[in-house]
Amino acid sequence: MKGRKVPTLFTRIVKGEIPCHKICEDECFLAFLDIRPINPGHTLVIPKKEIDYIFDLDDALLGGIMVFSREIAAAIKKSVECRRVGIMVAGIEVPHAHVHLVPIQSVGDLNFAKSKPADDQELARMAERIRKHLK
């Protein structure tokens, strides 16, 4: 239909139309494992409200996504051997604001060229490991 907006992949995940390996969610945000991780534990954090560009988020959502991401990052760091959990906002691949939380040893690890499809069972095990470290 003309003028009908097609929901993004992430909106379809929020609605449960597409499965994901969910880490955590609240009324505003959802965190789930990336199916093409740069490193094991690579997690996406999205607002449930479909907004394309991260800097178009209102102040509450923009600040909220960082606060929500902090707890997820701490759980990732306890679950995966890494120096830090890096954060990256590219915002090109899916027209729905999101941040990448990636376990890294160095800044060179934040490279999408290193990503590759992950096995679904590996993702399920990783999601469970990370969830165990959430409050």
Image (cartoon, rainbow, N blue to C red):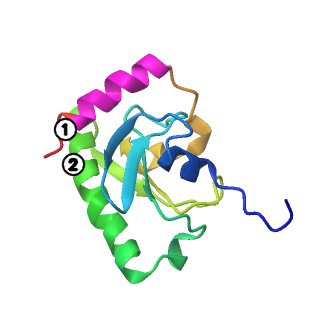
Magenta residues span 120-131
Question: In the rendered structure, does residue 33 fall within the stretch colored magenta?
Answer: no
Residue 81 seen in the figure = no
Q: Is residue 88 above or below residue 13?
A: below
Disc 2 secondary structure class: helix
Quarter that holds the N terminus: bottom right
Question: In the rendered structure, does residue 124 fall within the stretch colored magenta?
Answer: yes
Tell me the crowding category of disc 1: few under 14, some 14 to 19, or many 20 or more residues within 10 angstroms, Cα based.
some
Tell me the crowding category of disc 2: few under 14, some 14 to 19, or many 20 or more residues within 10 angstroms, Cα based.
some
User: Residue 126 location, x and y as percent?
Assistant: 33, 27
- How many marks the image carries: the answer is 2
Q: Main secondary structure of the magenta part?
A: helix
The kind of residue tagged 2 is: Ala
The kind of residue tagged 1 is: Lys
Q: Are marks 2 and 1 in contact (CB under 8 Å)?
A: yes
Give the residue pinned by disc 1: 78
Q: Residue at x 50, y 19 (%)?
A: 119
Q: Residue at x 33, y 31 (%)?
A: 127
Q: Nearer the viewer, residue 93 or 27?
A: 27
Q: Residue at x 37, y 63 (%)?
A: 28
The label number, if any, that marks residue 124 in the structure image: none
Q: Is residue 112 above or below residue 2?
A: above
Give the residue pinned by disc 2: 74
Residue at the right extreme, as displayed: 2
